[in-house]
Amino acid sequence: MSEESYYSVKMRAARGGAHISGAEKIVPASAVPKVASVLVERALTHAKGVPDFINLKVESQEGSLSRLKALKVTTHATRTAAEGRAVAAELLRGAGIGRADEILARFAESHSMRGAMLLDVDTLECLEPDPERGVRATYMDDVSSLQKGTAGGKNHYAEAIVLATKVQNAPGVVGEICVSDDPDYVTGYVATRELGYRRITVIKEKGDPNGGRIFLYRGPRDGVAETIRFLEQTPVLVTDVPVLAAVREEHRFDQLADALAAREKAGLSRYCRTLVAPTGPTAIVDGRELLVLASNDYLDLARDPRVMAASATAARTWGAGSGGSRLTTGTQPPHVRLESSLARFKGTEAALVYGTGYMANVGAITALVGKGDAILSDELNHASIIDGCRLSGADVLVYRHGDLDDLDRKLSLCREHRRRLVVSDGVFSMDGDMLDLPRFLEITRRHDAFSMVDEAHATGVLGGTGRGLSEHFGCGHPDILMGTLSKALGSEGGFICGSQLLIDYLRNVSRPFIFSTSPGAPALEAATAALEVLEAEPERVARLRENVALFVAELAKHGVETRSESAIVPILVGDEKAALAASAALETQGILVPAIRYPTVARGAARLRVALMSAHEPDQLCRAAAAIASCLKTTQGKR
Ligand code: WAQ
Ligand code: MG
């Protein structure tokens, strides 16, 4: 160890003279500032209240520190306070302390003491000189805080072991009983040198602010002074505290808390708002009705009575969950039925359903390419595509967004790779623009590459009957056509459509497909029913398109220029906090439009992202466009 000198740092906090919290550390000089600040922060945030008095005492520790090995810990899991007290009495009796019940009955006397009662274990006389203060065990720490110079977080457990170890090493002490006085902390312990530290998980009622300690003494009266001197003045370091792992864990969580705080500061923190209503163009949020311009349920099918009924019937017929992965027991008629409906709808030989769209992208990409292969990926592709690329182990070449010349050039660099996979969103989820599929197919074929297109936001949206990009352009399909059940189809899940060979291959190789419990019949039958509604009512697609055109035109009338080739209308703001402010201002006007920020889009490219539904009424869209334009003027004016 270094030549550094050591200090004890002690904190005591009180309010109106009543004790709130106390702690101490023995640390090298260099760690004193950090330790002091941690202890003061702890005093200021204690569950018992805000102190009006904090005493921080820093003293140099000259001479050698004695080292004691920590008591061994055993845990007694109790469920109630009464059970905990019974266990404590039993333990004491087992340690040869005959009057255990009487001792426990005296416990309340220790509540008001700042320190512990010192009780003669045989005569039950109080031996502490000052009954208000009690006897305090101090000048102790665990050896690791000395070595590392850290202060640790708030850790009742580690500190209690240190204290109990010192106390059981005091001359004349034969036992201890302790109950925390933190109202939220119901754990206590009994300690003796032979029993070690017997942790009792529940020993008082939650919310009870009364805690205390009794140190049990056996010996002549003229030994008491020496016992107290040891407890109150002899510095000790405790080694081998069994909870250092727990203390380290607390530090790991501190880092997570710091990371969250940093996000908060940058306007990047996230939370989930609760919408109290079936998915639809309006919802109840915090008791208010909001116009929702954010749902991916583009064709209003999630709450369609036929879709809901199909799902409910499926739950009654096939159960809530599937009970297994597809390759074991998780394939039921609804799985088979939906896959053939999807293949027919998209015009491919076969289809394969996954639990989510994310899984479909990750599952297809990682099955098709690996080390020695190349993936070419549009820079604005969805996170699930990016994650699939990363996980695959293939070389990933990112081409500029929508720049198929760049793709062409980059594909030329990949001739030596075993396989090439080119992957693109069909409709880009944050910009609402569309892939030029015919040219994409021409380039990928010319370079002998697999083509993969994600139609999550294209299915039900593009083409006269919502079949997607191929219908829109009147061209062929990519080799791997991905889509979701969770957007225009109003349900949940993802899928891949393609040749029978492709689907057979994925069924054998695709890990998210193989190693997940299959999605349940209620979700799948809902999707099958939604496909039927969509095929019977293609006018929903036309209505959605009219709504987009109207909304973009209304925005333009108010001076906000944007464009969209889908149901997604991006309104670029730039600054993250300005986007948040605009979104918050719109919410006060009863309109829900999320601010999309890094990492979903690039830093400084924050935006309002509007998603429209076929079910929005024209007057709702006119009102929303006017409100958005005026909010943007206000927030931009402030910058
Ligand atoms: N010396 C003597 N008595 C003390 C001391 C001390 N240094 N510090 C506190 N006390 C007395 C005081 O009367 C308190 O009211 C009582 O002990 C309880 O103190 O998970 O948190 O600081 O295994 O609330 C034990 C269980 C937690 C830990 C102990 O004690 C576990 C705890 P608290
Ligand atoms: Mg306390």
Image (cartoon, rainbow, N blue to C red):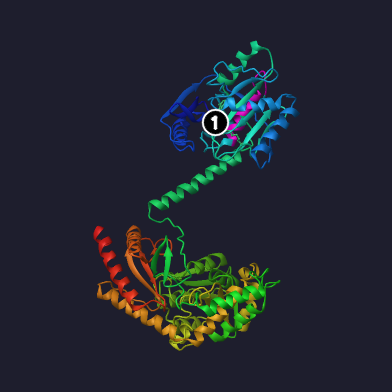
Q: Residue at horizontal 54%, vertical 78%? A: 307
Q: Which of 176 and 359 is in front in this view?
A: 176
Q: Residue furthest top?
A: 222
User: How far across and down, in percent of the image, does residue 428 sit?
Assistant: 43, 73
In the picture, the quarter occupied by the N terminus is: top right
Residue 461 % position (x, y): 44, 80
In this orientation, does residue 480 appear?
Answer: no
**Residue 75 in the image, given as x and y percentages of width and height:** 68, 38
Q: Mark 1 points at which residue?
A: 146
Q: Is residue 407 visible from the viewing direction of this image?
A: yes
As drawn, 466 above or below 88:
below
264 part of magenta stretch: no
Answer whether residue 167 is magenta in the image: yes
Q: In which quarter of the image is residue 219?
A: top right
Q: Tell whether circle 1 marks a residue whose Cβ is less than 8 angstroms from ligand 1.
A: no
Which span of residues is magenta-colored? 157-174
Q: What element carries label 1?
A: helix
Instruction: Decide whether the magenta segment is chiefly helix, strand or loop.
Output: helix
Q: How crowded is mark 1: few (under 14 residues within 10 Å), some or many (20 or more)?
A: many
Kindly give the residue lying farthest to the bottom in the view shown: 474
Image coordinates for residue 620, horizontal then vertical, percent: 34, 74
Residue 347 sits above or below residue 246 on the image: below
State the quadrant of the C terminus: bottom left
Front-most of 213 and 568? 213
Q: How many marks?
A: 1
Res. 582 image quadrant: bottom left
Name the residue type under label 1: Leu
Q: Is residue 367 left or right of residue 563?
A: right
